[in-house]
């Protein structure tokens, strides 16, 4: 190993565990700079928001299943929202807006990035912490006030923002159009602050991965979650400032009376849409690329096989991220944008299906000739592939410009986004939570309860969202408070009621997961270092890993997916396990 | 209609429905292949005592095959779609001899400017109707779409027509009805708290009916507000 040189100041960051941890409670658990604690802080915060977002969805489903009927006990929400338990249209618009906003910005995005980029990156690359630990702490402590402002909007006069999560101008700029002023401003301000939080995170993740990989951890030995989070961070770095800039202009329009997006003062509503979707489409990939990474890791582990086509997987992620920049116009086919431009955006959008198909076939290739162990992370991951594919297919319908004419702004879009974001991202999040829970908390989640949760979630998810395709075909518009106003939609009450019942079942099934999560935090079976018999570096340290992660600077000898390798007696071969004496291959040159 | 689309009454609707059908079959095949392979793997390769995984890292030929086949599939879909799309939305391809009508969307109603017997907008015999669009059958209709306050979206489910109405822009839309009848007209873009009830009707008249309606409605002093009666088909 004489070829490996490590700068002494870098190696000295690795703590000797015999040293006691002298940090106070506040520095250790609240204002912590430890990437693991920050990841766990993001986990608790975003799970709380996931619950809030889910409750809002239940309110939506009540109104759509039983339009205009009183929700038993609904009057506790107050006269301005649900007088006598009957939901008002203005409250419906707020609930629908906030369901989307909270789920995207405060639940799924932090669950994928805030939690796992923080928690996993240093552990998987063999680093003691992030490159900028204080910036990392700032990232979390900016997300908190953003969340507080977002929740505060529910309690202000006039109600919360009601212009949809896309906040199309000029509906969102002038209070006289929605009847909402304070809520709309709080919405904008909160997302501006959250944008800075995301940026602080992204620069940190990128710098850490580029600079702090352990000796031997070459780019093509990086585990795929880290690869995916690396590419995602680049997307965040390029997309979020566009949103933040647009939001600042929107805030000016809202409070200073400027006219960037308001045609009354010479502004251009389509400008908002271009800026928003220029962020918004990369955002879709920010919400799915990390999921690709987690699922690749877990399917290889569950199949006891190397990831099929590792290089193709990395290239596909990169290609998707790149193409993600030139497809934003497909959200605007019916917006009044030049139709020839629309045809161009259709072509780029269709091309994204190609790298996506590569990934799907490589996941199947990974399972092929494997030795499949159906632990719960594996079940969620297989379900991810199966459900995400359906979301991909419905995406082809919407990408086809002429087919998008009848389907645009209908429940077909709602079905599509939920197959991608729930069937896709959220199933991958369940996979990630159950897979890394033992590492994070040193205890196992109860496998049997997880499987019960998986079963009910899978069934109710499909019962909830699959019929929505049919609602969309029938022409039912999204974001509609009472579709029974329309003759051609009157017949859809029964199917909507079925969807609502399934949605209530889906929500209830999540309580099983919540209970299992909380119970096992305290009472779960103790996990060893490596309960899944996995290869990546995070499994070589204790569960939970100590402050500073590694006692000694780890040395990496191979890629992360050497499962069932003939060179190893076990069916796994940790990245840092030295090779057998007679066949010592030089570790790849270090980049430290 | 087969896929649960509302019945089609426009000249170009069938080409949209056919494109939908083509995509449906392509994706249905891919769906069966992918889900079938997943189920096969789950059953065939499940862990049993003594089972050993085959540590293969990949296969370049397979990688190329499953890159090229989806690429051909989606690019054909894009190619098929492009001409259907441009025939509907590209103004330079709009059919001539159209009946022209103004449609101004505002919170939460559709204000129609009918051209009157002279068939031209901006003349003295123009007359307004509210939430009621009247057009002749078997003649292209050119709707000049504008908006007063926020973005609305002009949606005719039975005609496969959808186009946002954007304040500050005038967007032309065309369609041609193939049968007379009364149809729903909806707003598809969230436009405020009354969005859900921003509905109107489209009445397609036979040529004789249309003249009679024009004479009667245009004859009465302009400004007759017609209360919408929602009646499907």
Image: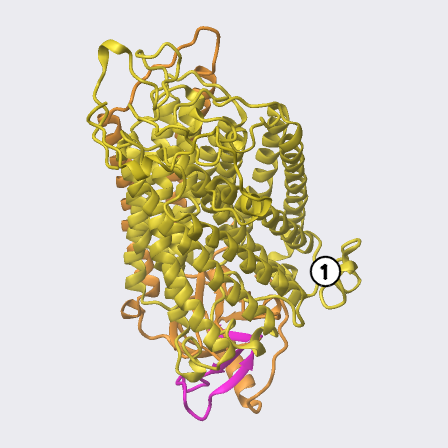
Chain colours: A yellow, B orange
Tell me residue B188's x, y (percent): 51, 64
- Residue A276 versus residue A358: which sits nearer the camera? A276
Tell me residue A71's x, y (percent): 76, 55
Q: Is residue A419 left or right of residue A331?
A: right
Tell me residue B109's x, y (percent): 57, 76
Residue in view at x 73 percent, y 68 percent: A80
Q: Quadrant of residue A99?
A: bottom right
Instruction: Assign a secondary structure to mark 1.
Output: loop
Query: Considering only vertical position in the picture, is A529 above or below B198?
Result: above
Residue at the extreme bottom of the image, as rendered = B124
Whether residue B129 appears in magenta in the rendering, the answer is yes
Kindly tell me whether residue B18 is visible in this rendering: no
Kindly tell me whether residue A149 is visible in this rendering: yes
Query: Considering only vertical position in the picture, is A344 above or below A555?
Result: below
- Residue A38 versus residue B29: which sits nearer the camera? A38
Q: Quadrant of residue A92?
A: bottom right
Task: State the extent of the magenta-drawn residues as a range.
Answer: B108-135
Whether residue B70 appears in magenta in the rendering, the answer is no
For label 1, the residue is A68
Residue in view at x 34 percent, y 12 percent: A568
Q: Is residue B216 left or right of residue B17?
A: right
Quadrant position of the N terminus of chain A in the picture: top left
Q: Residues within 10 Å of mark 1 (few under 14, many from 20)?
A: some
- Residue A298 versus residue B1: which sits nearer the camera? A298
- Residue A369 versus residue A304: which sits nearer the camera? A304
Q: Is residue A357 left or right of residue A527?
A: left
Tell me residue B144's x, y (percent): 41, 77
């Amino acid at each position: 190993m004489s070829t490996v040189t490590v700068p002494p100041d870098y190696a000295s960051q690795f703590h000797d565990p015999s040293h006691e941890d002298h940090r106070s409670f506040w520095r250790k658990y609240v204002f912590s700079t430890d990437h693991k604690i920050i990841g766990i802080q993001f986990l608790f915060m975003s799970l709380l928001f996931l619950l809030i977002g889910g409750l809002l969805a239940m309110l939506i489903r009540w109104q759509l299943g039983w339009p205009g009927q009183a929700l038993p006990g609904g009057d506790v929400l107050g006269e301005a929202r649900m007088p006598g338990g009957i939901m008002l249209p203005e409250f419906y618009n707020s609930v629908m807006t906030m369901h989307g906003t909270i789920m995207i910005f405060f639940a799924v995005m932090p669950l994928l990035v805030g939690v796992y980029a923080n928690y996993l990156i240093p552990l998987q690359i063999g680093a003691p912490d992030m490159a900028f630990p204080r910036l990392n702490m700032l990232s979390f402590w900016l997300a908190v006030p953003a969340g507080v402002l977002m929740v505060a909007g529910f309690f202000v006069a006039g109600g919360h923002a009601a212009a949809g999560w896309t906040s199309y101008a000029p509906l969102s700029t002038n209070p006289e159009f929605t009847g909402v002023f304070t809520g709309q401003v709080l919405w904008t301000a909160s997302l501006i602050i959250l944008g800075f939080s995301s940026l602080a995170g992204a620069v940190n993740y990128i710098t850490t991965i580029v600079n702090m990989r352990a000796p031997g951890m070459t780019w093509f030995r990086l585990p795929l979650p880290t690869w995916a989070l690396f590419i995602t961070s680049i997307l965040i770095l390029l997309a979020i400032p566009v949103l933040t800039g647009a939001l600042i202009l929107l805030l000016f329009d809202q409070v200073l009376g400027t006219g960037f997006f308001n045609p009354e003062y010479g502004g251009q509503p389509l400008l908002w849409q271009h800026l928003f979707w220029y962020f918004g489409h990369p955002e879709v990939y920010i919400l799915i690329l990390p999921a690709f990474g987690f699922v690749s890791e877990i399917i290889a582990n569950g199949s006891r096989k190397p990831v099929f086509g590792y290089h193709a997987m990395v290239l596909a992620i990169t290609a998707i991220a790149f193409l993600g920049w030139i497809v934003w116009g497909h959200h605007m086919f019916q917006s009044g944008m030049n139709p020839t431009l629309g045809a161009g955006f259709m072509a780029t959008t269709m091309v994204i299906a190609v790298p996506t198909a590569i990934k799907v076939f490589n996941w199947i290739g990974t399972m092929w000739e494997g030795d499949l162990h159906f632990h719960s992370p594996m079940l969620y991951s297989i379900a991810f592939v199966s459900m995400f594919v359906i979301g991909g297919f419905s995406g082809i319908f919407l990408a086809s410009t002429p087919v998008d004419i009848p389907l645009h702004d209908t429940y077909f879009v709602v079905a599509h986004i939920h197959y991608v974001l729930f069937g896709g991202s959220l199933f991958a999040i369940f996979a990630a939570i159950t897979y890394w829970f033992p590492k994070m908390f040193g205890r196992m989640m109860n496998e049997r309860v997880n499987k019960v949760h998986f079963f009910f979630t899978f069934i109710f998810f499909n019962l909830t969202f699959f019929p929505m395709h049919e609602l969309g075909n029938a022409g039912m518009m999204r974001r509609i408070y009472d579709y029974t106003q329309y003759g051609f939609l009157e017949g859809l009450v029964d199917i909507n009621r079925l969807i609502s019942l399934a949605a209530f079942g889906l929500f209830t099934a999540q309580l099983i997961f919540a209970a299992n999560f909380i119970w096992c935090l305290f009472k779960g079976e103790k996990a060893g270092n490596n309960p899944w018999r996995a290869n990546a570096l995070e499994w070589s340290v204790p569960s939970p890993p100590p402050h500073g992660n590694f006692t000694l600077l780890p040395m990496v000898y191979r890629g992360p997916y050497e499962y069932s390798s003939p060179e190893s007696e076990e069916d796994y071969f940790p990245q840092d396990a030295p090779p057998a004496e007679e066949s010592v291959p030089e570790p790849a040159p270090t980049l430290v | 209609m087969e896929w649960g689309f509302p019945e089609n009454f426009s000249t170009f609707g069938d080409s949209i429905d056919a494109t939908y059908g083509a995509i449906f079959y392509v994706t249905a095949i891919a769906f069966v292949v992918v889900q079938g392979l997943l189920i096969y793997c789950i059953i065939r390769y499940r862990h049993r005592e003594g089972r050993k995984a085959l540590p293969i890292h990949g296969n370049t030929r397979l990688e190329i095959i499953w890159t090229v086949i989806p690429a051909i599939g989606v690019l054909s879909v894009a190619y098929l779609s492009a001409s259907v799309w441009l025939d509907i939305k590209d103004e330079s391809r709009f059919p001539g001899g159209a009946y022209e009508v103004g449609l101004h969307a505002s919170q939460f109603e559709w204000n129609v400017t009918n051209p009157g017997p002279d068939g031209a907008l901006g003349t003295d015999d123009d007359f307004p109707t509210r939430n009621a669009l009247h057009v002749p059958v078997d003649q292209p209709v050119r709707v000049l779409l504008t908006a007063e306050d926020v973005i609305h979206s002009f949606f005719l489910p039975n005609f496969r027509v959808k186009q946002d109405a954007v304040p500050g822009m005038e967007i032309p839309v065309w369609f041609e009805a193939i049968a007379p009848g009364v149809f729903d007209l909806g707003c598809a873009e969230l436009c405020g708290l009354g969005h859900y009830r921003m509905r109107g009707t489209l009445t397609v008249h036979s040529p004789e009916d249309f003249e009679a309606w024009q004479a009667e409605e245009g004859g009465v002093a302009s400004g007759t507000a017609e209360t919408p009666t929602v009646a499907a088909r």
